[in-house]
Amino acid sequence: MFTQQQLMSILSSLPDPAFILTRSGRYAAIFGGKDLRHYHDGSGLVGLSIFDVLKEEKAQWFAAEIEKALDGGELHIVEYELSGSDVQGAGDGPSHSIWFEGRVQALGFEVDGEAAVVWVASNITGKNEVQQKLRQLSETDALTGLYNRRKLVETLDQQLAIYREKKFQTSVIVFDLDNFKRLNDELGHHAGDAALVEIARICRQQLRQSDVIARLGGDEFVVVMPGTHRSDALEIAEQLRGCVPAVFRENLRYDATISGGVSEFSQPDRLSSDILKRADEGLYLSKRTGRNRVSAL
């Protein structure tokens, strides 16, 4: 139907690049990649190995995926990221991260004496960015930019599973602004919103990058602290409580305090909500005993 020359012309015209990769990771041939909006000319890779082109860790990942495709015999689909830091030689790689979908199929014949695959790489960076933005919108609180209840529950479920398997402890702080209703009544809801935003800023400044900070609703906030025991979490919560009045006075010209409760996972816990409930009980104990304090349960 087509001459060999015509078939080669068709393959060369493919918008996405198709790499012929041997089991050892050698680039045996490259076809297509003519959509210059997304791809560079990869013809210079032919004859090289992925271990010549990529850093060891990334090359090992590609080798493992090639092996999976060869072993499975079926279409193998993976998503992966490439950046300049993955490429051997300064300046040889992209200056920013690029996301690809790889569609990898074992070939029914050997190439230069080796089993081989065809690996079609589609640039999905734009799609990935949209998905990340949608994910961020679904996981964050619109006012404060902190995580929302959905992300909080997901995080607690993950940490409970880790605790059960590895006994890796996690603590939780629950706190809110004392007399928040009075603030709204006296100064208006715009002032209340400003106070919540300020609390979020203080949390980002005072807490660790590993801590997951969420707005549970209203003026109630939750901090999930992986790898932290209750005694350490209590100390951190006290530091947070101590800095709030001065910051509010300076930035919002308003006297404010917070009350909180702290807890950690325990053996009887069956649901992630168990730890949240104990921390919440600690919060209400702090309220009943005078506010502007943190209680651990």
Image (spheres, rainbow, N blue to C red):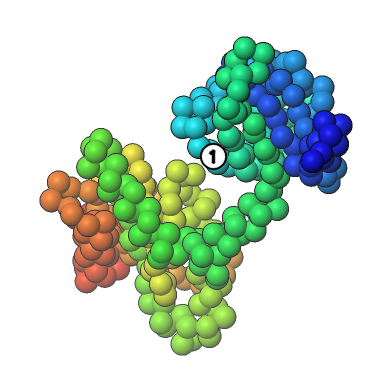
The residue at which mark 1 appears reads as 75
Q: Quadrant of the N terminus?
A: top right
Camera sees residue 194: yes
Q: Residue at x 65, y 24 (%)?
A: 21
Relative vertical location of residue 196 with respect to residue 1 in this rendering, above or below: below
- Residue sitting nearer the eye, 232 or 146: 146
Q: Quadrant of residue 282?
A: bottom left
In the image, taking residue 232 as reference, residue 75 lies left or right, namely right
Q: Quadrant of the C terminus?
A: bottom left
Relative vertical location of residue 170 with respect to residue 135 in this rendering, above or below: above
Image coords of residue 121 (percent x, y)? 68, 39
Q: Residue at x 26, y 56 (%)?
A: 272
Q: Residue at x 42, y 75 (%)?
A: 218
Residue that extends furthest to the top in the rendered view of this protein = 113
Secondary element at image label 1: loop
Residue that extends furthest to the left in the rendered view of this protein = 268
Residue that extends furthest to the front in the rendered view of this protein = 1
In the image, taking residue 260 as reference, residue 46 lies left or right, namely right
Image coords of residue 214 (percent x, y)? 43, 60
Camera sees residue 80: no
In the image, taking residue 218 as reference, residue 107 lies left or right, namely right
Image coords of residue 165 (percent x, y)? 24, 38
